[in-house]
Image: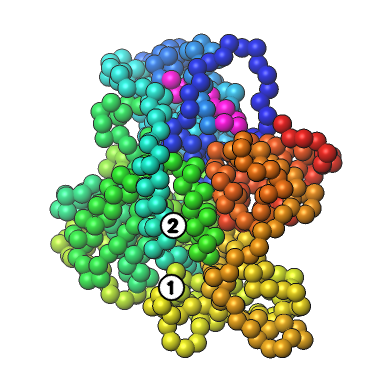
């Protein structure tokens, strides 16, 4: 992924900048797959109506390719630019597969297999199609698409238009508004105002809301499951109509009610995916029109569900209005804020109003004895510090996909979540008010403490502190005495250290591990006992600024040179790069990360992932992870391109 482009003799296609929504997915494709938020690629299927033939499928897809620029668009590997090609620039990416029976299980397995095939959006069409043949008769078309060009709604629109063509129906006239023509930047002053407002909202919300109230302290994997119910579909419809909100908003309100009931937190962040397709001109678009916005949910203790639903609906509308920011710049600003605050403010709850097909997972299917619900479950694999809830309402069936780390919810709690949500919908549909509880229904786990900025696991802070080479022993506890100016007691670290270790060293060490260790928060104050020293001394880490540290090792000098190269041309050189600060502190945003990684690769270095560069770790911490490429020594004397 991180390579310099090869020279091509083909005619140059039309190049246009990626819009601000696409930029996130363009950057996200560089993140290692297990850590990506969105599934890439997307995949789904539709049945082929008789008497349509394989040739009809080819003809329909060729017509749709000529109609939609997205189907013939590639992206630049190092710059946020997309290229629109001619309709005949490449063969249609379609193949066939003979199956003995085109039943539901076969369709899911075949969709999973197609989704597993890699798509290179830099050199190939950003989609693939496969026709399933049963005894020589075409039964279904499977489609997969790369998220950088086509979003989930767009894939559904593509399948719908394909099905209409195969049935011989007229496809609605093409909109005069071309999605790829809408890559316009907001005025910089409005973008900065939106950025400041968003950062203020993020900073005001507690962190780690779910973690103290469930899961396992040693959790290191994730659980995936899918809950389907026809009864919940009818209940949801009645609840949404009664409270005059969309069904998707009603489910998010029910999830917010569940979180507040479980944790006792009445203000928290949820990351919500909203599709900008209210205008008729965009409803048939295949392009990336969905925006993920952090929604600040604030519930009044004792409020009836009607008030909860209205509050959540208003919060989503506000979030979308203020969320049309430049994500490349905002994420960098958030990283700077997180490093200053000493806590990662990324929401631990993500809600999507379009349920991604989960066929690409390796599921074990079964039916629970307590009701007519279909489940898909898989064993834990990679760590996951977020609760993902994806909703689908198709053909009268309520489907909720849940993916959650077992340090947030263990297997039993994860399985119980959709059951409880559906039970809440049933009670609300029957006329119950179900007010928001004033106090949590579940106690916090031992070893957790509610700091002014959120929940923190004391043992996590102690473990990270003990990992610093200058720390001999460390204990973390709430501050003794009266609350501080912020209305709450601060967290204090008592550390016995070797000579030469300062509070600034410990503070920087904790900051470097913010994005790596769940449930970590940096204490505001450190009480140090140097080995052989005169006794304890207190340092207010929040009021001290660590001195600038220039690059000292070959790896640090290579990283500093790459940072200097991707910054503004008139910026200072590599020697002025402060290795004690994070990448965002140097004015480098997401759109520059692919080029920065390519420069390091050119110098023969690897070992840093793109999402690590977007986090709060200092450049010195990142440089320590650099290592030579296999079978290649670093080229320290070379000048990067």
Quadrant where the N terminus sits is top right
Q: Which residue is mark 1?
A: 452
Q: In which quarter of the view is residue 184 placed? A: top left
* Residue plotted at (49% across, 33% down): 148
SS for dot 1:
loop
In this view, the residue in front, 474 or 255, is 474
- Density class for disc 2 (Cα within 10 Å; few <14, some 14-19, many ≥20) is many
Measured as percent of width and height from the top left, residue 292 is found at 40, 45
Residue 69: in sight, yes or no? yes
Q: Which residues are magenta?
A: 69-79
- Where residue 549 sits: x, y (%)? 70, 58
Q: Which residue is nearer to you in this view: 134 or 376?
A: 376
Give the residue displayed 56% in from the left and 50% down from the top. Answer: 584
Secondary structure category for the residue under label 2: loop
In the picture, the quarter occupied by the C terminus is: top right
Instruction: Give x and y (percent) for residue 40.
Output: 52, 38
Q: Is 419 situated above or below 449?
A: above
Locate residue 390 relative to residue 283 in the image: left or right: right
Q: CA distance from mark 1 to mark 2?
A: 17 Å
Residue where numbered disc 2 is placed: 347
């Amino acid at each position: 992924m991180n390579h310099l482009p090869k020279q091509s003799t083909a005619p140059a296609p039309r190049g246009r900048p990626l819009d601000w929504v696409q930029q996130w997915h363009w950057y996200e494709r560089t993140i290692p797959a297990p850590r990506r938020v969105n599934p890439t690629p997307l995949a789904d299927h539709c049945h082929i109506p008789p008497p349509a033939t394989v040739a009809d499928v080819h003809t329909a897809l060729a017509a749709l390719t000529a109609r939609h620029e997205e189907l013939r668009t590639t992206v630049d590997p190092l710059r946020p630019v997309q290229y629109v090609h001619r309709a005949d620039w490449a063969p249609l990416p379609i193949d066939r597969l003979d199956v003995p029976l085109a039943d539901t299980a076969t369709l899911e397995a075949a969709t999973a297999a197609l989704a597993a095939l890699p798509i290179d959006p830099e050199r190939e069409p950003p989609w693939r199609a496969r026709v399933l043949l049963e005894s020589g008769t075409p039964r279904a078309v499977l489609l997969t698409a790369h998220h950088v060009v086509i979003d989930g709604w767009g894939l559904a629109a593509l399948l719908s238009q394909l099905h209409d063509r195969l049935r011989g129906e007229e496809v609605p006239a093409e909109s005069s508004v071309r999605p790829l023509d809408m890559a316009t930047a907001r005025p910089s002053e409005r973008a900065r105002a939106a950025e400041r407002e968003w950062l203020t909202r993020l900073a005001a919300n507690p962190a780690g809301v779910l973690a103290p109230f469930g899961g396992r302290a040693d959790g290191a994997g994730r659980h995936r499951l899918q809950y389907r119910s026809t009864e919940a579909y009818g209940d949801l419809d009645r609840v949404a109509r009664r409270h005059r909100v969309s069904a998707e908003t009603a489910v998010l309100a029910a999830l917010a009610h569940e979180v507040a009931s479980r944790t006792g937190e009445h203000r928290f962040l949820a990351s919500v995916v909203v599709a900008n397709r209210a205008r008729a001109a965009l409803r048939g678009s295949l392009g990336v029109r969905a925006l993920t916005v952090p929604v600040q949910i604030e519930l009044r203790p004792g409020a009836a569900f009607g008030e909860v639903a209205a509050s959540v609906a208003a919060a989503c509308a506000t979030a979308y209005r203020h969320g049309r920011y430049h994500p490349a710049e905002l994420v960098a600003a958030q990283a700077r804020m997180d490093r200053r605050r000493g806590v990662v403010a990324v929401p631990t709850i993500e809600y999507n109003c379009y349920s991604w097909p989960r066929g690409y997972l390796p599921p074990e299917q079964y039916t629970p004895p307590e009701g007519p619900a279909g489940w898909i479950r898989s064993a834990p694999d990679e760590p996951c510090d977020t609760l993902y809830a994806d909703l689908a309402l198709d053909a009268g069936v309520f489907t909720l996909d849940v993916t959650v780390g077992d340090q947030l919810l263990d297997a039993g709690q994860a399985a119980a979540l959709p059951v409880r949500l559906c039970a809440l919908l049933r009670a609300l549909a029957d006329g119950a008010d179900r007010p928001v509880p004033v106090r949590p229904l579940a106690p916090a786990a031992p070893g957790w403490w509610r700091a002014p900025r959120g929940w923190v696991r004391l043992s996590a802070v102690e473990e990270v502190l003990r990992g610093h080479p200058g720390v001999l022993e460390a204990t973390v506890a709430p501050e003794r005495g009266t609350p501080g100016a912020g209305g709450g007691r601060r967290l204090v670290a008592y550390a016995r250290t070797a000579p030469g270790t300062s509070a600034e060293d410990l503070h920087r060490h904790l900051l470097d591990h913010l994005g790596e260790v769940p449930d970590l928060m940096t204490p505001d104050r450190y009480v140090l006992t140097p080995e052989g020293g005169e006794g304890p001394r207190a340092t207010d880490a929040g009021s001290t600024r660590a001195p600038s540290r220039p690059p000292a090792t070959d790896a640090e000098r290579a990283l500093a040179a790459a940072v200097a190269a991707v910054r503004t041309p008139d910026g200072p050189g590599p020697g002025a790069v402060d290795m004690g600060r994070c990448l965002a502190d140097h004015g480098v945003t997401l759109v520059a990360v692919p080029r920065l990684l390519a420069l390091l690769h050119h110098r023969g270095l690897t070992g840093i992932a793109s999402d690590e560069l977007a986090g709060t770790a200092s450049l010195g911490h990142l440089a320590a992870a650099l290592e030579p490429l296999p079978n290649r020594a670093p080229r320290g004397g070379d000048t990067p391109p």
